[in-house]
Amino acid sequence: MNFDNKVVIVTGAARGLGQEYARQFARLGARVVACDLRDCSDTLAAVEDEGAKGLALNTDVTSAESTKEMAAAAVDAFGGIDILVNNAALYGSLTFAPFDKLDESEWDSTMDVNVKGVWQCCKAVVPSMREREGGAIVNISSLAATYGMPNGLHYTASKAAVIGITRGLAREIGRFNIRVNTVAPNVVNTDATSEVFGEKRDKIVEVTLSQQAVRKPLETEDIVGTVLFLSSDMSKLTTGQTLMVDGGTVML
């Protein structure tokens, strides 16, 4: 895969999976716009270490104004937008509990970031993609959306909504040669996963592996190839799809 001269926006890019997506796009020649509420200077350094041009932005994906500024900065710096990876989400900071014990304000903030944020970012970048007569949007969902995650209904519902957005938007903007797909990973070894499960992490990973056909823990590099494929011309007639990266837990 070659992303020479492609302009990629990655949200939630300050660490973990988002940072790895940004680095790998840079390695393959893309110009990368790394966005997050957190500082993205480490990600920008990783992009530049790969010999690529990059831009680090402070972006609130729930804000129409902030996402418009994100898109405008990408266009000003690099001339347009070809790819969007909607990776930003609330996960590591969430409190997991039975559905009737979940905090209402946390439910609302989860939907705001994980669902509304995807919508806002798509709204912001599609005009540039239309001008360039094509593009690719890759949304990040979760195994939770297809398998069902007990004691995490806010997260599960938000990630199921991402799949719905993907399907509806793919039909709506396909005529502009813009593709929209979803990647749905299982539990990945990241800082956010450790934050969620704490001292229960090893037990959760053990149970997760017992349900996989391929019993190997998922690392960040195991997700990247699918994101790159869906962003590339190698998948130019693939749209509206959800690809599971879960070791064969859910087989669609």
Image (cartoon, rainbow, N blue to C red):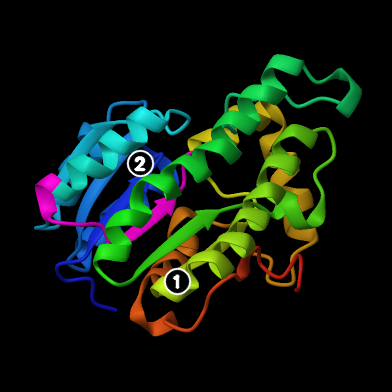
Count of residue discs: 2
Q: Quadrant of residue 56?
A: top left
Percent position of residue 252, x then y? 75, 74
- Between 250 and 210, which is closer to the camera in this rendering? 250
Tell me, yes or no, if residue 14 can be seen here.
Answer: no
Q: Which residues are magenta?
A: 76-89
Q: Is residue 22 left or right of residue 167?
A: left
Name the residue located 15 percent from the left edge and 57 percent from the top edge.
50
> Tag 1: Cα neighbours inside 10 Å, few (<14), some, or many (≥20)?
many
List the residue tagged with mark 2.
13
Going from N to C along the chain, the mark reached first, 2 or 1, is: 2
Residue at image location 31% in from the left, 62% down from the top: 129
| Front residue of this view, candidates 178 and 157 | 178
Residue 154 shows up from this direction: yes
Q: Is residue 168 above or below residue 98?
A: below
Which residue is found at the position 45% from the left and 71% from the top? 230
Depth check: give the residue in front, 94 or 202.
94
> Of tags 2 and 1, which is closer to the observer?
1
Task: Find disc 1 in the rendering and name its residue.
Answer: 230
Q: Secondary structure at mark 1?
A: helix
- Report the side of 105 relative to 178 (left or right): right
Q: Could you say where residue 73 lies in the image, as x and y percent from the top left?
A: 18, 40
> Neighbour class for label 2 at 10 Å: few (<14), some, many (≥20)?
many
Q: Based on the picture, tell me whether residue 83 belongs to the magenta stretch.
A: yes
Q: Is residue 215 magenta?
A: no
Of 238 and 177, nearer the camera is 177
Q: Position of residue 167 (x, y in %)?
A: 63, 64
- Quarter of the image with the N terminus in it: bottom left
Q: Secondary structure at mark 2?
A: loop
Image-based side of 52 in relation to 112, left or right: left
